[in-house]
Image: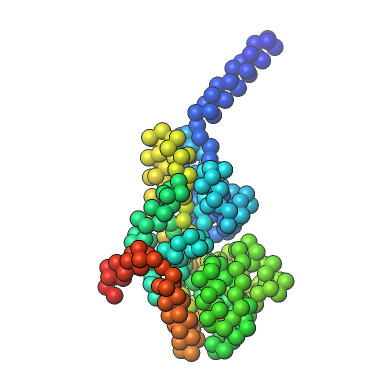
Amino acid sequence: MNKFLSRSVLLATACGLSAAASAAEWTMATPYGDASFHTKNVKQFAEDVAEATGGELTINVHSGGSLVAHGEIKSSVRRGTIEAGEVFLSTLSNEDPIFEVDTLPGVAGSYEEAFALWQATKPVISELFANQGLMPLYAVAWPAQGIYTDFELDDPERFEGLRVRAPNINTQRFVDYLGGNPTETEESDIPTAFSTGRVDAMITSSSTGNSMTAWDYVSHYTDANLWLPKNIVFINQRAFDRLDEATQEALLEAAARAEERGWQMSRDDNQASLEALQANGITVSTPNEEVAAALQAAGDRLFSAWQDRADEQAQQVLEEYQQQRGN
Ligand code: PCA
């Protein structure tokens, strides 16, 4: 009896192992915490993939920079240390200015325009990724960026010397042009940055303000509709090539659904977050005339500095998008 039992256990273990060996298990790193709609979307994507492939491909999502720091995610996927990743696209701007075209004021100020900008820039961005053995799966915009302060931002003079948390280099430049002192801070470091007095204010979206409980640190949100920057989700091309065709197709299909779902989640989360900010005591308003003029001037400067940096290809893509948009 005992002998029989142990033999069947052995047999079952062996079968289990061989099934697991044919199925792929991927590791994915993301920079934002579980409260972010981007992370919720990625997790749903991973579930969809597991279901659609009948477990042939499992993607284990490690969110909030817990496994790989934000700045290391792309290189880790490139090396193949992990198979999949998500980053805030504009943090790649040191590689190519096309990556930060979605953090320029006046380029795309609505979800429709932000999506059109993604369509227009996708071929170039995909090519740059492909050159590094990477394959973009989808991209989703954050809600428009605004300014969190612990006072009413009714005068552009208030920017003078203000220490402002910014999520990328372009936002840092913007703060600088406004007269403030920018600091680049990861989402996960926002609470410490405020509680240790390293920053007085921050630029981000309604969504991030909500998921990071901005009301613990600030009292006002100026909904300035600066720009709608994106996150991009991508994989290692070699890992993709190792999958069988049916699994590849299922993965791409799930990615297409994640993109569509993500843009809707962004819109919905913007509304819900604006409500949550107010319900928690934050005053939400739009910039007054003086503040709007200062933002415009800093924005114009940011735009022309980008044009000086951008190569011909990036400029051409932007021009084509603008022509399409009817500008
Ligand atoms: N949230 C992210 C990127 C833009 C946004 O709205 C952040 O602030 O880090």
The quadrant the N terminus occupies is: top right
Judge left or right: residue 221 versus residue 128: right
Model colouring: rainbow
Image height of 323 relative to 294, above or below: above
Q: Quadrant of residue 113?
A: bottom left
> Which picture quadrant has residue 15?
top right
Residue in front for this viewpoint, 66 or 49: 66
Q: Position of residue 152 (x, y in %)?
A: 58, 85
Q: Is residue 267 visible?
A: no
Please state if 80 lies on the left or on the right of 300 as rendered: right
List x then y, in percent, for residue 36. 55, 59
Q: Quadrant of the C terminus?
A: bottom left
Q: Residue at x 50, y 71 (%)?
A: 170
Question: Residue at 59% across / 17% down in the picture?
Answer: 11
Identify the residue at image location x=65%, y=64%. 189
Q: Is residue 106 shown left or right of residue 3?
A: left
Q: Position of residue 186 (x, y in %)?
A: 60, 63
Nearer to the camera, 321 or 153: 321
Specify whether residue 4 is in view.
yes
200 relative to 156, above or below? above
Name the foreground residue: 116 vs 99.
Answer: 99
Total numbered labels = 0
| Residue 230 horizontal/vertical position (percent) | 46, 62
**x 52%, y 47%: residue:** 77
In the picture shown, does residue 299 fall above or below 136? Answer: below
